[in-house]
Image (cartoon, rainbow, N blue to C red):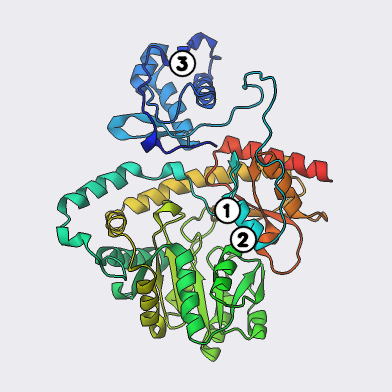
Amino acid sequence: MNRSNEGTSHRSIVAGADFLHLTIDEAPSGGKSEWLVQQIRLALADGRLPVGSRLPATRVLAGELGVSRGVVTEAYQRLVEDGYLAGRGRNGTIVVGAPAMTTAAKPPTLASPPSPHSVFTVAPNADVFDVMRTARARIDFSPGLPDLAAFPRAAWLREERRILDRLAASDLGYGDPRGTAALRVAVANWIARNRGIRADPGEVLIVAGTAQTLTLVGQVLHSDGISAVAIEDPGSLGARQHLHNCQLDTPPVAVDSEGVRVDELRATGAAAIFLTPAHQFPTGVVLRGSRRSELTHWASESDGLIIEDDYDAEHRYDRAPVPALRSVLAENVFYAGSVSKLLAPALRIGWVLAPPKYRDALLDAKRFADLGNAALPQLVLAQLMESGALERQLRHLRRYHRRRRDAMVKAIAAHLPGAIVHGAAAGLHLTITFEAGFADTDVAAAALTRDVKVHPLSWHCQRPRQPGLVLGYAASPPTDISEGVAILGEVLRRMS
């Protein structure tokens, strides 16, 4: 889906009487809302409604079309849920995204331009992972992306204005490298409410997302003489890259249906491990009670360290929450969280709690890295956390993400009947595996030439295993999800 920054777009007002020259007589009886949705989608796709346009008020358009206001309201709401429109209060309903035109809707052309990805090839190594991460595609199933069109712009702007109105001049100077006091208090309260972690605000270090947490913790551990941090297999290639960048080895530890294999962890001899226990990336497995007990014994017996990435912990649909490891192992756990999946990765705001013996070293590493994060976004986020606005945003996102998860599961059943679905009960992605013997990197390469971007499962594995794909669904509306999965089905059929 082609989305633009509405803040930089020319915002035009679409008059009610001339709105798309619609004639309600063309609508089927009993399906007026669906007809209106399709007409607006077509206008979004062909450019008649550019990003930034303001649609007529529901009352105005209903009057012009001669239908009930509920018909227009339902159509607008459908398009809001699909990520194409957004309500802006007194500013009305604004276009924030546009679907791609279907083949049937496209005007005829003499020749189709070549795809920008037509010569792209994929191999399962870190260099190609970086290329793929920055490649653009019309339908992007990259894992870890939330619905960016749902960012609460109005609430953010309102709080930012209030803060600027009362901000003292001295507050604009160099601040505490640990982060603003307001955000550290808000984070301590947030993780207590949502993750069962009791922490003093003085223990909270504000960082630029989980990526910086890994870099800072990696530096500290390397300086302390630790040479290896074990990592789940399959497990995040991105996390592995950050740890390698700190000159740390990453011996693999298998993950099964109960979570990480603690017996394999012991066999590696590693003094530390990186884990995603609440929703394991990429399999979606939850670390079960028996494994948690084994892990606790390992940490106690060997003074082992755990880097806990609380990945996707807030995004649950069909299962109960699980407690964070930090809540029971404060002396051994580096706990990392962020708002990248809850608000937007571009904010670059996260937090880390370190074991007491490493707290000062981690603060020094942060100070010398950048002197601390920007203060104004921290203050805005603190207010959203403390006011309850962030909880409301989370509830809102769960409804959107659940609908998109359901659309992907349905599309997989229809177009990829041989796929086995993993990890659909929570998170922003799911993983599918296949029994067939093909290279999942070839599937990813072929899909990219069709403008569909996916992660091959093998990228996130250090040891060979069955082929699969990691598919993020939160950033795509249901229509794009259905189309993208259908294209994956076509790609697989051509390869078989």
Three-letter amino acid code at disc 1? Pro
On screen, residue 151 above or below 349: above
x then y, percent, for residue 466: 76, 60
| Residue lying at 44% horizontally and 41% vertically, measured from the top left | 149
Q: Are marks 2 and 1 in contact (CB under 8 Å)?
A: yes
Decide which of tag 2 and tag 1 comes sooner along the chain: 1
Mark 3 or mark 2, earlier in chain:
3
Instruction: For label 3, count other residues whose C-alpha is less than 10 Å away and answer few (under 14), some (14-19) or many (20+).
Output: some
Q: Secondary structure at mark 1?
A: loop
User: In the image shown, does 175 or 302 lie closer to the viewer?
Assistant: 175
Q: Secondary structure at mark 3?
A: helix
The amino acid type found where label 2 is placed reads Pro
26 vs 482, left or right, is left
Dot placed on the residue nearer the N-terminal end, 1 or 3: 3
Task: Give the CA distance from mark 2 to mark 1.
Answer: 9 Å
Is residue 153 found left or right of 224 in the rendered image? Answer: left
Q: Which residue is mark 2?
A: 282
Asked whether the residues under the numbered discs 3 and 2 touch, taking CB atoms below 8 Å apart as contact, a structural biologist would say no
The residue shown at (64%, 62%) is: 126
Near-viewer residue (195 or 119):
119
Residue at numbered disc 3: 20
In the image, residue 330 sits, relative to residue 17, either above or below, namely below
The image quadrant that residue 60 belongs to is: top left
| Residue that badge 1 annotates | 143
Kindly state the secondary structure of the residue where label 2 is placed.
Answer: loop
